Amino acid sequence: MENRSDNGDLVERVAYLVELNRRVKGGALPPEIKRGVLIKFWAKMREILFANNVSVGMQ
């Protein structure tokens, strides 16, 4: 079972990724870098969202 520090870490990770996504969508990056950042963003977000396959119905 997760404790409060695990939840805090998860919240920080999601907040960081959301902020990164906001910056990318703001148009501050060249297209080729933007694409790479978005790929990494969704790879990390999938790790967070699907950490427990049973809880999100992935089975």
Image (cartoon, rainbow, N blue to C red):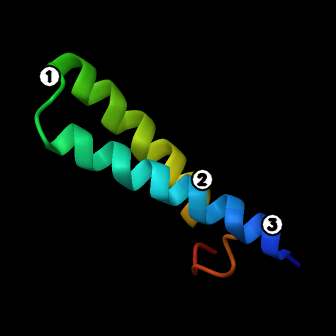
Callout 2: few (<14), some (14-19), or many (20+) C-alpha neighbours within 10 Å?
few
Is 32 drawn above or below residue 24 in the view shown? Answer: above
Q: Which residue is depicted at the point 47% across and 58% down?
A: 15
Q: Which residue is mark 3?
A: 5
**SS category of the residue bearing label 1:** helix
Q: Which residue is depicted at the point 13% across and 42% down?
A: 26
Q: Amino acid at mark 3?
A: Ser
Q: Quadrant of the C terminus?
A: bottom right
Indicate the position of residue 34 as horizontal and vertical percent values.
23, 28
Is 58 drawn above or below residue 10 in the view shown? Answer: below
Q: Which of the 4 quarters of the picture holds residue 6? A: bottom right
> Visible in this render: residue 51?
no
Indicate the position of residue 48 as horizontal and vertical percent values.
59, 59
Nearer mark to the viewer, of 1 and 3: 3
Q: Which residue is mark 1?
A: 31
Proximity of marks 1 and 3: CB atoms separated by less than 8 Å: no
> Alpha carbon of mark 1 to alpha carbon of mark 3: how far?
36 Å
Q: Quadrant of the N terminus?
A: bottom right
Q: Amino acid at mark 2?
A: Glu
Callout 3: few (<14), some (14-19), or many (20+) C-alpha neighbours within 10 Å?
few
Nearer mark to the viewer, of 1 and 2: 1
Q: Amino acid at mark 1?
A: Pro
> Alpha carbon of mark 1 to alpha carbon of mark 2: how far?
24 Å
Q: Which residue is mark 2?
A: 47
Indicate the position of residue 40 as horizontal and vertical percent values.
44, 35
Q: Nearer the viewer, residue 7 or 48?
A: 7
Q: Earlier in the sequence, mark 1 or mark 2?
A: 1
> Alpha carbon of mark 3 to alpha carbon of mark 2: how far?
18 Å
